[in-house]
Image (cartoon, rainbow, N blue to C red):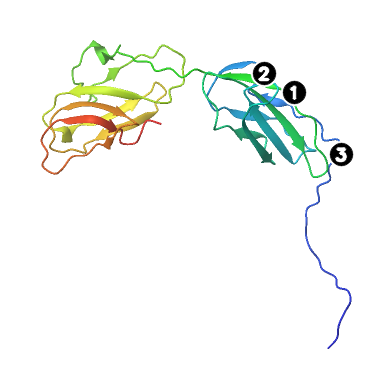
Amino acid sequence: MPTSTSATIDEEFNLKVFDNNVGEVAIVSPINGAGNQVANPLLEWQDLPSASSYLVEVSTSSDFSMIAESATVVNKTSFQTTLLNPSQIYYWRITPSNGCATGSIASIAAFQTAQDVCNVYDNEYFENGDNVWETDVNAVSARVDVPEDIEITNLSFYMRADHNDTGHIKMQLSSPSGRFSEVYNRECAAGRDFDLIVSDQGTAAFACNPGYTGALTGNLRAWTGFF
């Protein structure tokens, strides 16, 4: 049997050459001093060609003795936080590195997350100033004004309506931008009247047993969810 002490093998591979001087990352967002941020903002920074990974650190103290969240991100320039709290000042920094060296820690940036508030709006009014069924669109529309510039992350509303067959009714909740949620879509064909709260934290879905003829009550979930 013939033998050989050497062989030639052809393989394709990618070679990435790193500089020993990795450099410093430039932070993009949130910028230093940013306020009113969502509780878990997306952290973004500029790409550093000499880096292959980034150590992201978020702290409640400027000396980073209290780390709230950290992660090593590979070949990406963003990190989605998930463990932060509202109404809190955070400090964050980026340390780039590659297979050869670790770069300088980026200048520390601070941001403040917005305070979570629970607002009740009872300034509802009907389109055209009445609660008359509009035959041209086959609907009646109630509106609520939200004057504050806030991000809504949780929503519920109370509804009481009289109708002798809930199988006739379809309800939608819409925003000024046009985004809407299907709240109720004729799930209970023989029910009568509505007296309920609708929320994503509802304890039950819209449903009723065959032949049920009572009112729809309770704390129910929207058919497609609000968020």
Cα–Cα gap, marks 1 and 3: 20 Å
Question: Would you call the spot at circle 1 few (<14 residues within 10 Å), some (14-19), or many (20 or more)?
Answer: some
Residue 32 disc label: 2
Looking at numbered disc 1 in the image, what kind of residue is underneath it? Ser
Question: At x 75% / y 41%, what residue is drawn?
Answer: 52
Q: In this view, does 92 lie above or below 101?
A: above
Secondary element at tag 1: loop
Residue 20 disc label: 3
Question: Would you call the spot at circle 2 few (<14 residues within 10 Å), some (14-19), or many (20 or more)?
Answer: some
Is the C-beta separation of discs 2 and 1 under 8 Å?
yes
Relative horizontal placement of residue 113, taking residue 15 as reference (left or right): left
- The answer to whether residue 99 is visible is yes
Looking at numbered disc 3 in the image, what kind of residue is underneath it? Asn
* Residue that sits furthest to the right in the current view: 5
- In percent of width and height, residue 180 lies at 36, 29
Relative horizontal placement of residue 36, taking residue 153 as reference (left or right): right
Is the C-beta separation of discs 1 and 3 under 8 Å?
no
N-term mark: 2 or 3: 3
Cα–Cα gap, marks 2 and 1: 9 Å
Residue 107 disc label: 1
